[in-house]
Amino acid sequence: MALISPSEKDFITKGIEADMRNDGRSRIAYRDFTIETGIVSQASGSCRLRLSKTDVLIGVKVEIGDIISNTTSDNNNEQEQDIVNNQNESDKGRIVCSVECSPSASRDFEGKGANDINNELSQIMNRVLNGPQGGIDLKSLCIIPGAQCWIIYVDVLVLDYDGNLLDTIFLATRAALQNTRIPKTEIQDIGNGQLEFDISDDIEDAEKIKGWEDVPVTVSLNKIGQKYIVDATAMEELCTDTKIIIAVNRNGEICAMQKSLYGSLNPSLLTEMIRTAKDIGKVLIKNLDTTLEHEQVMASRANNKKFGFFI
Amino acid sequence: MEIIFNTPSAPKETENIENKQNFHIVTPGEQITSDPAFMRGHGTYTQEDVVMASVAGVVERVNKLISVKPLRTRYNAEIGDVVVGRITEVAQKRWKVDINGKQNAILLLSSVNLPGGVQRRKTELDELNMKSFFSEGDLIGAEVQAFFHDGASSLHTRNLKYGKLRNGSLVVVPPALVRRCKSHFYTLPCGVDLILGLNGYIFVSKHPDKKSEELSPEELYSNKNEEITFYQRSAIARVCNCIKALAKHYMYINDSIIIYAYEASLPYKISDLLHDDICEVIVEKAKLQIEMQQTL
């Protein structure tokens, strides 16, 4: 467990009270992001997003799998079960997320320390993304109803850590899903009600995931002292009494909420926090989408040389 | 509300500093010399009589011994070094201190000052009261006194300039950037105190109202911060951001370059100092100032 001294804690808390955080930011200011997409050639979609020192790499892979309906499943995998329980229909695909925090990222992730946080983050992602609130049109992932569908695997690797991990992960997921292409399938009827399908090899034919525009991003609000802040650094997270995670989509609709840690909240403060999260979430999505568009325009230009992680 | 998404850009063409300043920078696996007369030191290995670098850094030569000083490394303590550390464990008659080294440093109960400055052997009662001096998480300023057999360094705080740190925040930079100099304790003109730990931990705090000699015995080990005004808090934040900017551009860090960077940063808002482009402007300005001073 990372340590902090009582006087540092007092300094941070009083600074937040005075709207002058340790790095000079105001309470509702974010640090700068650095984004790259489409960097992992083996994946269907990928993104690396950095927020100061926090560094997240996401690979999305689409694979064909069986549709497991609630009644027939005898799956032992707990997380998969969790997702399956949420869907009773037999004409939907699914999204499976897993987060892995690299032990080199933080002292807290060494040994078995990362297990808890890996599980927590994976579960939040699975719960937010699987369902109507997740934005993605799960029905469009279905290939043969009751039999086969596309499964979107979202694998998150945390390379470095300096606070506000969840917001970074969700923004990167949105960017990676925007970047993902699913191959086209063609269904054939081979008689007696049997269906068969072919996967198109043509890369040009691959389609974007339907509904990626509606994938929400999270805004984590940390209550420190009597005030709350967004985009906490690792040090500020150590001073946090209560944390509220709010998932917002591009229309400013709240898609999910979670309270963590042991502190309490005033209902009036909670409404204020939700309003802030809504406003910030919309700006986050707007700016992210503009950057992604810009990146695509740049990439399509001739003699454009790409720079970044895998160069 | 301003939220910025950057995309990675082309590395900037920089002038070749190797020729200008007589540096030799190497990357792992790069050949340093094939002359068999040289001996290999830290950060190197030999392959077929060729000395190669095993780390990325600057080549240093002492007579026939060649070593590479890595840029990113853990701190290697030397006796007499001023360090800033964080207490991680309270054990039998000693504290374990994180100083960003390969192993935790040790602060013995016998190497701290008692409140009130009384000189006597430490009793069992003192041992029971250890947590009231320093407890887990506390930041301390200390000096490296000696080494144990296993290589762990032994610290001491038997001077009023060392001891518990309050009224400020910690900035962490690569230890290679902090150079040894006459003093590591500074008061900047903007009313901010600095402790440049050689281990890369830099403590930036408000200049205290009372000198450390005037503190009452209880205040010496207290966890309570003094009253800090908004102006002082902004000055601390600005200095912290300047240090981070310098570290981002791998500039060495001492008092004068921090002052120059601080002056260069004054036209900008403190939170703007987090943006990459503004960091670059400030560091360039500070660098020019230093070069001008050297040519005078």
Image: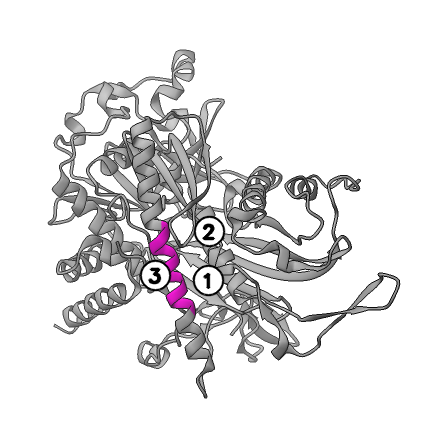
Residue linked to disc 3: B248
Tell me the CA gap for discs 2 and 1. Answer: 43 Å
Question: x, y (%) of residue A226?
Answer: 27, 29
Question: Disc 2 vs disc 1: which is toward the camera?
Answer: 2
Left or right: where does residue B157 sit relative to residue A64? left
Q: Which chain does tag 3 point to?
A: B
- Comparing A225 with A301, the one in front is A301
Above or below for A166 versus A8: below
**Which residue is the extreme one toward the top?**
B125
Amino acid at circle 1: Pro
In the displayed image of the protein, which residue is found farthest to the front?
A192
Residue A157 part of the magenta segment: no
Q: Earlier in the sequence, mark 3 or mark 1?
A: 1
The residue shown at (51%, 74%) is A311
For the record, the magenta segment spans A281-292
Discs 3 and 1 lie in a common subunit: yes
How much space separates mark 3 and mark 1, taking CA atoms?
A: 16 Å
Q: Which mark is residue A216?
A: 2
Regarding residue A305, the answer to whether it shows in the image is: no
| Residue receiving disc 1 | B70
> Residues under labels 2 and 3: Cα distance?
33 Å
Residue B39, image x, y percentages? 55, 69
Q: Amino acid at mark 3?
A: Lys
Image quadrant in which you'd find residue A186: bottom right
Question: Residue A272: x, y in percent?
Answer: 29, 36
For the residue pair A202 and A245, the one nearer the viewer reads as A202
